[in-house]
Image: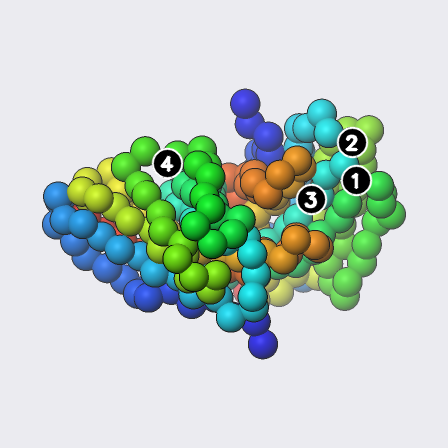
């Protein structure tokens, strides 16, 4: 059974803290994604990675960075968390074809 | 520019009613893929269907059916005889060149018992 796991379901951090969100997939997929989901805005792509150490910016990369040192793991980093980064963060991975995305359960991050 | 539009923000229906969720997309590519995902209250998005741009055949899976019309750039989703378990947020998504997916803003469906 395919699986994408995220390190935390809920996270509360203070403004200015460095935050790491971890995502692991067990399907040997090359492509992995980080989205944030906000009410009324749907899913917006932050970053994606098409291979180890390779990354591309999505639509809203500001304030975020990513790391992909191993194929199965894709980390999202908030260098200095701010209250406007309070959101649901979703990780996903896909095969090249048929492009079906598998999502993790999400991490609801609150920055106070 | 919005690439995927889901104009219906929230829909409520009474159980056993049919309901159609609209999706309009925008792309200049001739090769693209359209998707529907379901996000139940538990939060994890679940893949429902993928359709490529060369296959306009409508699809039916149980109570679910999808109507793909290139002429109107629409990929609508119909649930027949809705059930309470269908209550969820439904997202339409588009993929064309490259690996980026574009999601609509979602339609929240509530099925009232």
Please identify the quarter of the rendering in which residue A23 is found. Answer: bottom left
Q: Are marks 1 and 2 in contact (CB under 8 Å)?
A: yes
Chain for disc number 2: B
- Can residue A107 be seen from the camera position used here? no
Discs 2/3, front: 2
| Disc nearer the start of the sequence (3/1) | 3
Query: Which residue has dot 2 on it?
Result: B30
Which mark is first along the chain, 2 or 1?
A: 2
Near-viewer residue (A102 or A94) = A94
Res B53 label? 1
Other-residue count near label 3 (Cα within 10 Å), few / some / many at <14 / 14–19 / ≥20: many
Q: Are marks 3 and 4 in contact (CB under 8 Å)?
A: no
- Which mark lies nearer to you, 3 or 4? 4
Relative depth, front residue between B63 and A21:
A21
Give the CA distance from mark 3 to mark 1.
Answer: 8 Å
Q: Residues within 10 Å of mark 1 (few under 14, many from 20)?
A: some
Q: Secondary structure at mark 2?
A: loop
Give the x, y percent position of residue A79.
Answer: 22, 44
- Check contact, mark 1 vs mark 4: CB within 8 A: no
Residue placed at 66% from the left, 53% from the top? A96
- Report which residue position mark 4 lands on: A61
Q: Give me the C-alpha separation between circle 2 and circle 3.
A: 12 Å
Tell me the SS state at disc 1.
loop
Where in the figure is residue B5, as x and y percent of width and height? 59, 33
Task: Determine which residue is flagged by label 3.
Answer: B34
- Subunit that carries the residue with mark 4: A
């Amino acid at each position: 059974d395919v699986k994408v796991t995220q390190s935390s379901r809920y996270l509360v951090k203070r403004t200015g803290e460095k935050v790491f969100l971890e995502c692991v997939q067990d399907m040997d997929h090359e492509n992995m994604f980080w989205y944030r989901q906000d009410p009324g805005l749907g899913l917006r792509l932050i970053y994606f990675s098409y291979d180890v150490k390779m990354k591309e910016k999505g639509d809203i990369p500001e304030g975020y960075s990513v790391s992909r040192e191993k194929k199965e793991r894709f980390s999202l980093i908030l260098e200095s968390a701010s209250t406007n980064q309070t959101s649901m963060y979703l990780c996903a991975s896909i095969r090249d074809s048929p492009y079906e995305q598998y999502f993790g359960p999400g991490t609801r991050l609150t920055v106070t | 520019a919005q690439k995927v539009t889901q104009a219906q923000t929230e829909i409520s229906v009474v159980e056993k009613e049919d309901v159609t969720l609209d999706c309009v997309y925008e792309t200049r590519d001739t090769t693209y893929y359209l998707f529907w995902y379901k996000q139940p209250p538990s939060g994890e998005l679940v893949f429902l269907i993928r359709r490529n741009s060369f296959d306009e055949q409508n699809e039916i899976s149980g109570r679910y059916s999808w109507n793909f019309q290139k002429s109107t750039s629409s990929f609508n989703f119909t649930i027949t005889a809705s059930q309470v378990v269908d209550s969820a947020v439904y997202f339409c998504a588009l993929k064309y060149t490259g690996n980026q997916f574009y999601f609509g803003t979602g339609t929240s469906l509530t099925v009232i018992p």
